[in-house]
Image (cartoon, rainbow, N blue to C red):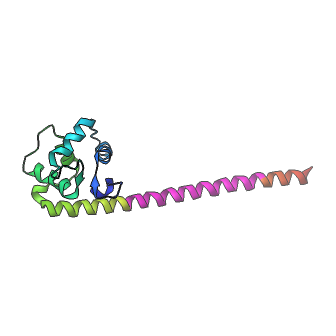
Amino acid sequence: LFSLYDSGRDGYIDLMELKLMMEKLGAPQTHLGLKNMIKEVDEDFDGKLSFREFLLIFHKAAAGELEEDSGLLTLAKLSEIDVSIEGVKGAKNFFEAKAQALSSASKFEAEIKAEQDERKREEEERKHRRAAFRELKSAFTQ
């Protein structure tokens, strides 16, 4: 999940990347809400989330240290992992596996789309050949 939304590939989730993540998870947040989410776990006060800080969200959720209306608690619940059972290392493995699965799913979707595009192109080609044949046939029948 982390690497999936780290679109800058800099090892951090910034405000805009967090915004996109929350929207994709179906729990959009206000600008202020996003800033507060980062502030809750931003140990180095750089205004963005490192992977360690990201995992801290799940640790705090498991320990009951997040407010009920916290966007971070929402994120932890939507992420499909219970850190109290899996541990932080398990969460790390989970997110890496999920990112890989989503990447594979994207490749699979791309392959399906390519096949559909190819079929569409072939159908267009067939229509064009039929039209050309009809045109040629009409020239001979006159």
Q: Quick check: 48 above or below 10?
A: above
Queried whether the magenta region covers residue 106, the answer comes back as yes
Question: Magenta span covers which residues?
Answer: 104-131
Near-viewer residue (140 or 62): 62
Q: Is residue 13 left or right of residue 39?
A: right
Front residue of 6 and 48: 48
Residue 116 image-quadrant placement: bottom right
The residue sitting at 11% across, 50% down in the picture is 60
Judged left or right of residue 67, residue 111 is right
Q: Position of residue 19 (x, y in %)?
A: 30, 43
For the N terminus, which image quadrant? bottom left
Residue furthest toward the right? 142
Res. 89 in view: yes
Determine which quarter of the picture holds residue 31: top left
Residue 12, percent across and down? 27, 55
Please report the residue visible at 80 percent of the width from the left and 52 percent of the height from the top: 134
Magenta region, main secondary structure: helix
Residue 9, position as x, y percentages in the image: 34, 58
- Residue under the image location 32 percent in, 63 percent down: 100
Asked whether residue 74 is in view, the answer is: no
Whether the magenta-drawn stretch holds residue 9 is answered as no
- Asked whether 110 or 140 is in front, the reply is 110
